[in-house]
Image (cartoon, rainbow, N blue to C red):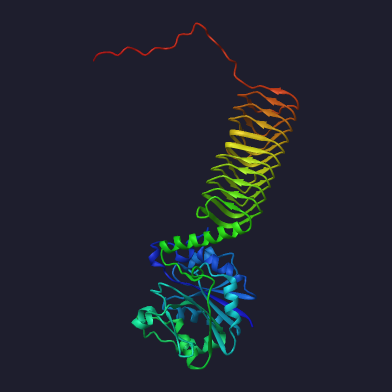
Amino acid sequence: MTLDVVILAAGQGTRMRSARPKVLHELAGRPLINHVIATASGLEDARLHVVIGHGGEQVREALADAEVNFVVQAEQRGTGHAVAQALEGLGDGKVLVLYADVPLIRRDTLAALLERVGEQCMGLLTVELNEPAGYGRIKRDAGGEAVAIVEHKDASAEERAIGECNTGIMAMTAAHLRRWLPQLSADNAQGEYYLTDVIAMAAAEGTAIATTQPGSPGEVEGINDRVQLARLERVYQAGEAERLMREGVALADPARLDVRGELLCARDVVIDVGCVFAGRVEIAGDVRVGPYCVIRDSRIGPGSVIEAHSVIDGAVIDGDSQIGPFARLRPGTQLARGAKVGNFVETKNATLGEGAKINHLSYVGDARLGRGVNVGAGTITCNYDGANKHRTEIGDHAFIGSNTALVAPVSVGEGATVGAGSTISKDVEAGALALARGRQISKSDWVRPQKSPKRDH
């Protein structure tokens, strides 16, 4: 059977107190709805339909690259009404209903639910909660079969004592939906069309209601305000920390880790506290990452050491390299084996050869440094003329003295030496010594100026 996934994303989310639609607020560096889309897209032969309403154009723009069909719910009249807007675009197979503000639902959980769905059976995901306030309760008959969902606001005291709750996530055939949705009524405390009312319809006509449960309550927890968003952020990060530790990564404190993308680590990686990993980051074995580092869209080779407070963005680092502390590697930086970028050094679109060193207090951009190059403190590559970028080429084993300005485009030959304090604007031949300083003058009889005496007024 075909599979249509209807993702409800039309709500205003007033409790977020934000001009941005709730589903575009971020968890682990991605909008809530993107988590749901990524999970649903992994289901076999899934076609995705996103129901939008409040802030719909912002949601469209944010999902411009996603393969989804947008459906507009002009008036927010409940979940049943929202799903009804998508009916026209559904096929004749199974339909799965998800929520854009329930970001941690797992693909395995959804697959298990869908396996129960057929012509004579629909699927309902429920969860046992110790504090079920606000959730719809699952009513079962004497035989233990689910027969209805009672919303919290409509529930009696006896019904509110039930611990099994509705997650809102359900699946059925499109034929079931087309038969049940027109029968929904808004005669309830909210004056809305509840999708949950189809449970009672299914029970009344003899359609079986198969229930399954998630691996943990966090999977199905929805987000209504920033407090819940922060709580689920830590649930997500705790899961990432556990995964990494089980794969052989040592975390100084699992509670102080933030993965905002995909972090792939080999064994015996050590990560100190307060580190943030964004985009796709690959870290080879025996790498040590110091505290409070930010690494984004980068690859770190084996045996490398990244000292505290370093920022690495869009870089490729070979093995046994040293970075930081307080280093910034910007996009396009490539370090060969054994290279070093030290404290308060910034690089951009720069390639460092094997064993090359920029130890401290320098900026190197749009440059290629050969093997064994040593760059002294305070060196800068003057790569921008106000309109265009230019490159600096430094040959193998060249030595660049401290406080040097290399005015690009310029090249320094293999084995050349540039004296400290030089401004180099012409190419330096291989093996040569280049000096470009103002002439030093000393006056032994010089008298330092004195302050004028104060005058009485």
Query: Would you say residue 384 is visible in this rendering?
Result: no
Question: Please, which residue is most extreme toward the top here?
Answer: 445
Image vertical order of residue 40 relative to residue 226, above or below:
below
Question: Please, which residue is most extreme toward the bottom here?
Answer: 205
Q: Quadrant of the N terminus?
A: bottom right
* 28 sits to left or right of 336: left
Image vertical order of residue 372 relative to residue 149, above or below:
above
Q: Quadrant of the C terminus?
A: top left
The residue located at (63%, 31%) in the rendering is 407
Q: Position of residue 6 (x, y in %)?
A: 54, 76
Q: Position of residue 231 (x, y in %)?
A: 45, 62
Q: Quadrant of residue 110?
A: bottom right
Query: Would you say residue 322 is visible in this rendering?
Result: yes
Decide which of 232, 349 is in the foreground and name it. Answer: 232
Decide which of 32, 118 is in the foreground and name it. Answer: 118
* 316 sits to left or right of 150: right
Q: How many marks?
A: 0
The residue located at (63%, 34%) in the rendering is 358
The residue located at (44%, 11%) in the rendering is 448
Q: Position of residue 89 (x, y in %)?
A: 56, 80
Q: Position of residue 211 (x, y in %)?
A: 53, 82
Decide which of 158, 438 is in the foreground and name it. Answer: 158
